[in-house]
Amino acid sequence: MISLSRVSVVPVISECERQEALQVLRATYEREKRWVADGNQVFSPDDLDRFDVAWFLARRNREPVGVLRVLFNPPLAVYAQYGFQPVPGVNFDVAEFVKRRRVAEIGRFAVLPEHRKNHYIAAALMRAAARDTLERGFTHYVTDIFEGEQHSPYLFHTRVMGFEPVATHDVGELNCPNRRVTMVLDLQAAYRRLRRSGGWFFRYLTADWSEALHRRLVGEETVLREDTSVPHFADAVLA
């Protein structure tokens, strides 16, 4: 039986923790998937001093087993080169989306192969990231997954979290031949859906959230604290 108490997640704020995260990234992105030539380049030491990026490290019994990154200033110039194609049947107005939402990119999600059956690792990483993202005043996530990739988190993202596919594109930062599926998540809508379900994942995801954060997402308090250290997604797109 998998013990949840043995899984912990910390924000990566030191070089020692970065080296632990790199162990996971080298094992997965470099050696297993071959998405990058050098796994050390995935997590720059400069990220430790940046306010617009957050890395999270999952450990099981003190062993590094998973990582996750959130960008609060997504690479819009890079996005412009991707050539997004809308998902058939989805009416998604990108211009309106970026005008009205504060969007963070969530990605670089990796779990060591021998620990992938432990779903608590993914849950623990998402819990840490979601709380940090919401406390910064961001309202939506955007992410890419590889279509048809053996270990794609597509089902977790769509069935558990509630991400919605909105576009596809063929190129990206990683060396993978699979088409990319771009998905977005409304964090408040996800909170309300999970709250209605009343399952263990909602209880676990929000276990350490403040009462004020719960009220904010329920809708009793609508004003979010903005993190002014990074620009609005829309401001950067429309500038």
Image: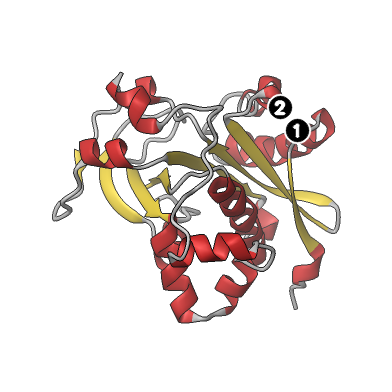
Q: How is the image coloured?
A: secondary structure
Q: Does residue 147 lie above or below 116 as drawn?
A: above
Q: Which mark is residue 169?
A: none
Residue 68 horizontal/vertical position (percent):
61, 44
* Foreground residue among 209 and 122: 209
Element class at badge 1: helix
User: Residue sitting at 45 percent across and 30 percent down?
Assistant: 74
User: Residue sitting at 39 percent across and 53 percent down?
Assistant: 185
Looking at the rendered structure, the kind of residue marked 1 is Arg
Query: Dot 1: within a 10 Å radius of its alpha carbon, few (fewer than 14), some, or many (20 or more) residues?
Result: many
Q: Does residue 166 lie above or below 158 as drawn?
A: above
Select label 2 or label 1 by which is in front: 2
What quarter of the picture does the N terminus occupy? Answer: bottom right
Looking at the rendered structure, the kind of residue marked 2 is Leu
Residue 143 horizontal/vertical position (percent):
42, 44
Q: Quadrant of residue 162?
A: bottom left
Residue 133 horizontal/vertical position (percent):
55, 46
Q: Quadrant of residue 158?
A: bottom left
User: Residue sitting at 53 percent across and 44 percent down?
Assistant: 225
Q: Does residue 88 lie above or below 7 as drawn?
A: above
Q: Quadrant of residue 144?
A: top left
User: Residue sitting at 77 percent across and 72 percent down?
Assistant: 3
Horizontal side of residue 142 vs 9, given as left or right:
left
Can the viewer see residue 86 in this picture? yes
* Foreground residue among 197 and 238: 238
Pointer 2 residue = 48
Distance from label 2 to label 1 (Cα)?
8 Å
Horizontal side of residue 239 vs 132, given as left or right:
left
Residue 119 horizontal/vertical position (percent):
62, 66
Pointer 1 residue = 18
Element class at badge 2: helix
The mark that comes first in sequence, 2 or 1, is: 1
